[in-house]
Image: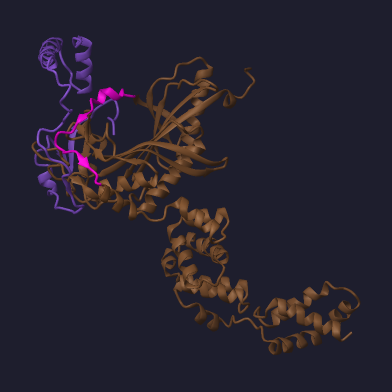
């Protein structure tokens, strides 16, 4: 497994819209590589005979019928908003356009 | 290859289309909040799940899954027996969890196709995949106390979306528009989505690149979005092909970017550089168990599919003798098609072709007139009865149109309108004879001219009889009776 470079850390920070200082970048580069080192240990295990899974509980097909349940009152929905204006949440403007979808 | 050769013949456009359709469920994708969000107060249709509060768990809306499976069958796709959800990670304030629940590796449907008519004949587009995901919230960029802020309304967060992605099979802007139109019709027919572009229920995005004709490798693609009508889809793609052609001819490099369509300027503009697929760091959604679709469930969904537009066009043409044009007009207008089908069923003796003429002609003309209230009042059986009266000569075509207009406006029965207006055509030889004798007696000069060999005078005499009977006479019978009298007396 390749080492994470400083450029990788900066790229991930950019994707997470985090503005990091030089000091933070250096610390995170070390911490992230430490995590990768631990995965290298896990990667030595032979998993050829184990099917991939994303689940730790053996459930499948949990569906619900298309029925309406009550929503929160607007004031409740906005109770944890960092700031509100009318019935809207307010956050600092993000430059650089929309995300995916 | 010379410089004088038109660019259109030197380059070929390669286009793939991504369409998001809002599914017609009553509740959201992963929670029970109502989807009736049009005109609702901001953040009035939200709960801990669609607000992305910590510790909540999503639950899959069964109806939304069924709509995607139904779409899969309708486009002849392979429907998955095992499907799964994935997290698409990106950070933007319209996405409260920091990820969108989507499907990446195992979409519900894959490898389908859709065939439709173009000005160049039928064209088939291969559909790579159709999958389920959740919509994001809506941002309004504003200024508040001198600060630039975003106002968030999470009502749309968690609305169920189906994303349908084609292979890069499309070569012209017209094919792209026709594909989107046919898919919209399909969505409306199977009831999966209202698919109205103006209010965002259907969003069309195009990946457009160009390459020298004969070259196999794709050029750099540009994503075009914000096209709010079918016309905009065609114009935006045509503009983008031309823009790239000019740029490549000038030796410029095409950048991978997302461009928006500016309707006012009729041009595309740079929105942002496109993120690479792996920047989304997709991974399996641990909060949702996998979904296995049983053969019984799939068969049930397939059996519920209504007649699809392509089959309906074929039936109208081949079994009911309509022109390809009329068949297409009817298939594209559900209300008109229902009226046509109802009239055919009400009186199988009336040729369907004549009923179709009335529906695509008079009915659609009046319906477009905006007097919407009358549209639903047209009774298919009354339409069939009216056309029957025209066929058997009891009423003239011109008067029938007036009768239909009144029925359209008031819903009053056809026979009652015909009686009230005195439109019953005079086909009775005795009654006609009296009117004809009166006209002949009053126009001796015309009679003499006719007998002197001026046959064209006959038309004038027919007109006089029609006038005398206020248009109620059967014109064919009048002409025959006149000729008979004039020729006999000679």
Q: Colour of chain B?
A: brown
Q: Quadrant of residue B159?
A: top left
Q: Which residues are magenta?
A: B274-294
Taking B169 as reference, is B99 left or right? left
Q: Which part of the image, by quadrant, shows the C terminus of chain B?
A: bottom right
Q: Which part of the image, by quadrant, shows the N terminus of chain B?
A: top right
Taking B413 as reference, is A41 left or right? left
Q: Colour of chain A?
A: purple
Which residue is farthest right? Answer: B452
Instruction: Work out whether residue B135 can be spotted.
Output: no
Look at the magenta stretch and give its main secondary structure: loop
Percent from the top left, x then y, of residue B49? 14, 42
Taking B429 as reference, is A94 left or right? left
Taking A96 as reference, is B457 left or right? right
Percent from the top left, x then y, of residue B459? 78, 73
Percent from the top left, x then y, of residue B277? 30, 25
Q: Is residue B488 magenta?
A: no
């Amino acid at each position: 497994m390749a080492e994470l470079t400083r450029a990788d850390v900066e790229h991930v920070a950019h994707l997470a819209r985090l503005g990091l200082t030089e000091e933070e970048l250096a610390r995170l580069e070390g911490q992230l590589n430490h995590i990768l080192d631990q995965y290298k240990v896990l990667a030595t295990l032979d998993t050829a005979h184990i099917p991939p899974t994303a689940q730790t509980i053996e459930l499948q097909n949990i569906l619900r019928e298309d029925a309406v349940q009550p929503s929160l009152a607007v004031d409740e929905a906005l109770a944890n908003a960092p700031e509100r204006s009318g019935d809207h949440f307010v956050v600092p403007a993000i430059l650089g356009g929309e995300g995916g979808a | 290859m010379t410089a004088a050769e038109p660019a259109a013949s030197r380059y070929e456009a390669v286009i793939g289309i991504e369409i998001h359709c809002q599914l017609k469920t009553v509740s959201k994708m992963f929670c029970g909040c109502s989807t009736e969000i049009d005109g609702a107060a901001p953040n009035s249709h939200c709960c801990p799940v669609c607000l992305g509060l910590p510790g909540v768990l999503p639950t899959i809306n069964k109806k939304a899954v069924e709509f995607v499976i139904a779409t899969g069958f309708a486009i002849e796709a392979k429907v998955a027996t095992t499907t799964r959800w994935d997290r698409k990670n990106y950070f933007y304030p319209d996405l409260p969890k920091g990820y969108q629940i989507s499907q990446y590796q195992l979409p519900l449907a894959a490898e389908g196709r859709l065939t439709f008519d173009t000005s160049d004949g039928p064209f088939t587009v291969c559909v790579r995949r159709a999958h389920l995901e959740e919509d994001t919230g809506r941002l309004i960029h504003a200024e508040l106390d001198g600060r630039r802020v975003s106002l968030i309304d999470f009502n749309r967060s968690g609305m169920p979306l189906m994303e349908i992605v084609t292979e890069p099979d499309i070569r012209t802007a017209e094919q792209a528009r026709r594909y989107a139109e046919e898919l919209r019709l399909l969505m409306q027919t199977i009831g999966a989505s209202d698919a109205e572009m103006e209010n965002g229920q259907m969003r069309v995005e195009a990946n457009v690149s160009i390459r020298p004709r004969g070259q196999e490798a794709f050029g750099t693609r540009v994503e075009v979005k914000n096209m709010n009508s079918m016309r905009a889809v065609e114009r935006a793609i045509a503009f983008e092909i031309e823009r790239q052609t000019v740029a490549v001819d000038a030796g410029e490099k095409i950048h991978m970017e997302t461009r928006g369509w500016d309707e006012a300027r009729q041009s595309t503009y740079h929105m942002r550089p496109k993120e690479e697929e792996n920047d989304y760091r997709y991974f399996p959604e641990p909060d949702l168990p996998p979904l296995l679709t049983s053969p019984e469930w799939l068969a049930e969904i397939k059996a519920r599919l209504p007649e699809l537009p392509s089959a309906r066009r074929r039936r109208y043409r081949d079994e009911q003798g309509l022109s390809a044009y009329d068949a297409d007009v009817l298939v594209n207008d559900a209300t008109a098609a229902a009226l046509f089908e109802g009239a055919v069923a009400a009186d199988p003796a009336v040729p369907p072709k004549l009923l179709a003429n009335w529906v695509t002609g008079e009915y659609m003309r009046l319906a477009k007139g905006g007097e919407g209230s009358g549209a639903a009042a047209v009774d298919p059986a009354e339409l069939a009865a009216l056309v029957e009266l025209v066929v058997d000569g009891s009423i003239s075509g011109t008067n029938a149109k007036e009768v239909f207009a009144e029925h359209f406006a008031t819903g009053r029965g056809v026979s009652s309108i015909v009686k009230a207006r005195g439109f019953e055509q005079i086909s009775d030889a005795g009654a006609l004879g009296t009117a004809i004798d009166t006209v002949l007696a009053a126009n001796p000069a015309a009679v003499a001219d006719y007998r002197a060999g001026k046959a064209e005078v006959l038309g004038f005499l027919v007109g006089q009889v029609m006038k005398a009977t206020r248009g109620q006479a059967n014109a064919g019978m009048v002409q025959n009776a006149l000729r008979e009298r004039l020729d006999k007396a000679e």
